[in-house]
């Protein structure tokens, strides 16, 4: 498969040279933020890890700590996010989401609904190593009901394989009967079908559902559910249909209100810059008729805005 990230390995890469350039940018009075900004988002994650090691070796200091003490605000948040390996970043986000004051359900939903089963396995391992607890246990301690059950199903990543032709229509009818058709909602049925069936199977179920119900399943979910369970079901449905489409929707949501949701903006641009940012951009344009690049440009400013645009990678 062709590479769909916006950040590629820097061609003439030299870790020691980059480490020296960063050292110079931070030594002395004031910080040369432009240099930091031009350099780090233009390297891929593996290269940033190499720069980190080279910095320690050449200058005896921890690059991440140095950057943290030199930068501030949203730019600091963004650069810190870039310096972590992807799954370590995910595990840290989840830990913060669960262990902070109150639960940041947005983060839980976004990561567990969108990562592949292989990625989730890796996150679980790193979570235990870095944070000393079991992710499953921590999620159980912080959530409840059908919402908790679906999160744990996503965490276990045990979806069925393939498409069961004989069950597609049955599942669509059962979902319709469990929601739009009856007074009250059979939440269990939604969780069971959306949490267990394969992605390919669910895509077909959603097509049949639309014919039966006369609307997309998301519309029915919005009409039937509320709160975290609604948000999680919507995320699962959108990711089944198209993961880049789901992220385009989340990015739109983070910018088109009074005040920008910078945490979401940083999280998505950092975590998808080496995955599928080109597809997210294409979906964004298709869904909203304008380029993601322009939307970010209108919504952010300064060095922080520049760094985000670098990760976005281009105007469509």
Image (spheres, grey):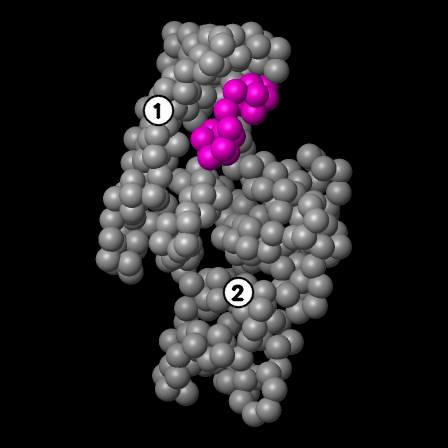
**Position of residue 183 measured from the top left corner of the image (x, y, whole percent):** 49, 10
- Of callouts 2 and 1, the N-terminal one: 2
| Crowd rating for badge 1 (residues with CA inside 10 Å; few <14, some 14–19, many 20+) | some
Look at the picture and state if 11 lies above or below 20: above
Where residue 11 sits, quadrant-wise, is bottom right
Front residue (pair 167, 67): 67
Please identify the dominant SS of the magenta region.
helix
Q: Which mark is residue 23?
A: none
| Crowd rating for badge 2 (residues with CA inside 10 Å; few <14, some 14–19, many 20+) | some
The part of the chain drawn in magenta is: 216-234
- Viewer can see residue 97: yes
Magenta region includes residue 38: no
Look at the picture and state if 200 lies above or below 316: above
Residue positioned 49% across, 79% down in the render: 69
Identify the residue under disc 1: 196
- Viewer can see residue 282: no
Identify the residue under disc 2: 77
Q: Secondary structure at mark 1?
A: helix
Marks 2 and 1, how far apart at CA: 36 Å
Residue positioned 46% across, 35% down in the render: 228
**Position of residue 28 measured from the top left corner of the image (x, y, whole percent):** 56, 92
């Amino acid at each position: 498969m062709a590479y769909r990230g916006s950040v590629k390995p820097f061609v003439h890469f030299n870790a020691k040279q980059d480490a020296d350039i960063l050292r110079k940018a931070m030594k002395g009075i004031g910080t040369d933020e432009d240099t930091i900004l031009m350099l780090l988002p233009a390297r891929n994650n593996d290269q940033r890890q190499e720069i980190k090691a080279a910095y320690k070796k050449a200058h005896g200091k921890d690059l991440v700590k140095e950057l943290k003490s030199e930068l501030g605000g949203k730019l600091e948040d963004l650069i810190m996010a870039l310096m972590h390996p992807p799954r370590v970043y995910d595990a840290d986000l989840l830990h913060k989401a669960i262990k902070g004051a109150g639960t940041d359900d947005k983060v839980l939903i976004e990561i567990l609904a969108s990562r592949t089963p292989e990625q989730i396995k890796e996150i679980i391992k790193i979570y235990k190593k870095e944070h000393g607890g079991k992710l499953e246990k921590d999620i159980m301690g912080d959530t409840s009901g059908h919402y908790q059950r679906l999160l744990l199903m996503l965490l276990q990543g045990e979806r069925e394989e393939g498409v069961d032709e004989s069950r597609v229509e049955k599942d669509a009818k059962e979902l319709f009967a469990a929601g739009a058709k009856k007074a009250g909602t059979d939440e269990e049925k939604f969780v069971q079908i959306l949490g267990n069936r394969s992605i390919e199977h669910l895509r077909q179920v959603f097509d049949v559902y639309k014919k039966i119900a006369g609307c997309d399943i998301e519309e029915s979910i919005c009409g039937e559910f509320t709160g975290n369970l609604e948000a999680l079901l919507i995320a699962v449905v959108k990711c089944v249909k198209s993961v880049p489409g789901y992220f385009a929707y989340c990015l739109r949501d983070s910018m088109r209100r009074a005040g920008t949701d910078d945490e979401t903006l940083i999280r998505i641009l950092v975590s998808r810059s080496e995955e599928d940012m080109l597809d997210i951009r294409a979906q964004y344009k298709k869904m909203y008729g304008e380029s993601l690049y322009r939307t970010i440009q209108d919504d952010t400013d300064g060095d922080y805005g520049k760094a985000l645009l670098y990760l976005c990678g281009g105007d469509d």
